[in-house]
Image (cartoon, helix red, strand yellow):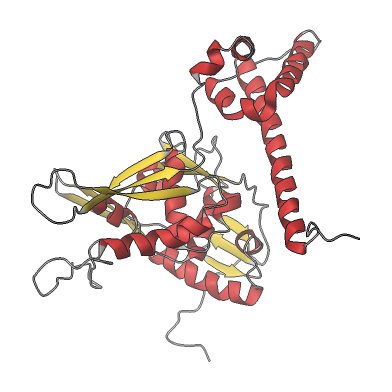
Amino acid sequence: MADKRRPTATSALPLTLVYEPQHKELVKQHWNVTFARQIKMSVAAKRIMARVLDQIRDDDFQLREYYQLALGDITDSVGISRENAYREVEVALRELVATSWEFKDVENEKWQIRHLLDTTKEQPVGYQNGVITVLLNPQLAPYFIQIAHYTTYRLDSYLKLRSWYSMRLYEILAAFRDTGVWEVGLDEYRQLLDCWHQTDKRGRVLKDKDGQPRLKYPSVNDLISYTTTEPLAELADTELAFRVLPRYETARTGRGRRKIEGLRFELLHPQATTIPVAWLKNPVTGPIIEKLRGWRVSDKNIALYATTLQRAGIAKLIREWELKENSARRIDSRDKYCNAAFVRAAKAILEEQKAEALQVRQDLQLGLFSGDKD
């Protein structure tokens, strides 16, 4: 007998993947989404959305009818058992279905609300036989398709994170890789990390005994501790490792300790996107940079990857391009071809270095370099 509390499904979920998801391992997230007030949700829900968004291509002009992913796409990197994963996915999909985005226009007193997922179609949102199916609300397509202002973040580190605060800060800090610094006021920080005014089920702000809005973690020290302790540890081995410093008020005239009015996040490995002046003036590297510019390699790519490729690697690439240019199969577009080749060669080296570092860490953990003599 069917449980009357739960409606029965009107259409069956696909038993297997209807299409093979092509994950690019990189998420482009609209700037307005990254810096919007987001409600804290489960880590599984964040992973599912990341795996949906990384299927969207730069040349897509509309959303897919639905997106699918295999259970392993969100569990393999963190070692979650299939049984536990099933329960987490069930909770995560409920959260995503309940998630809505609010749009407010204060000047026109206009307020709108739209759900993140679409549950109105015959194809349902759900999970079966290791396959997760998600339908994005087509009314939100401008935030997913052909976006002009966005932040990007890689999934190899992101999917291993086990804290919502870690994931949230990873998304935000990814927007400041070029400057290496994010300074934020305390109120804005509270809103971005879902530590703002507490509300009841109807969305009304709760008040304390003095009639003031109740805050999550009203103590600033508690706020900083609870929202950064896990991220500091989890992001320590990623490209977005950081330190956080309190920013104290400067206009205080009376006695007493200065209050914290904001935070300063400093990335430990900032990603330069402009060519250092010293490189341009150097008699050796200056001419190399000019050659790369002649092949239409962007300044950003030179700044990011020149130190990885080193002079020998760059010289090898230029020789290959010269040979190709003098052959029957000339380069059609230096912008596209040379930049792609430059980045691809650098990333191959970085992957090798990463694999070597991982092997050394594993060897050390196994005691292979313990110093014992035969």
Residue at 48%, 59% in the rendered image:
46
The answer to whether one can see residue 120 in this image is: no
Residue at 57%, 50% in the rendered image:
155
Q: Position of residue 370 (x, y in %)?
A: 78, 60
Residue at 52%, 58% in the rendered image:
234
User: How many marks can you see?
Assistant: 0
The answer to whether one can see residue 208 in this image is: yes
Q: Position of residue 243 (x, y in %)?
A: 43, 49
From this view, report whether residue 183 is shown above or below residue 295: below
**Is residue 178 shown left or right of residue 210?**
right
Quarter placement of the C terminus: bottom right
**Is residue 369 shown left or right of residue 204?**
right
Q: What is the residue that sits farthest to the bottom in this orientation?
A: 1
Residue at 66%, 30% in the rendered image:
308
Q: Nearer the viewer, residue 152 or 331?
A: 152
Residue 310 picture quarter:
top right
Q: What is the residue that sits farthest to the right in this orientation?
A: 374
Q: Nearer the viewer, residue 72 or 126?
A: 72
**Is residue 344 shown left or right of residue 170?**
right
Q: Position of residue 312 (x, y in %)?
A: 74, 21
From this view, report whether residue 62 is shown above or below residue 84: above
Q: Nearer the viewer, residue 82 or 217?
A: 217
Q: Position of residue 222 (x, y in %)?
A: 31, 65
From this view, report whether residue 104 is shown above or below residue 133: above
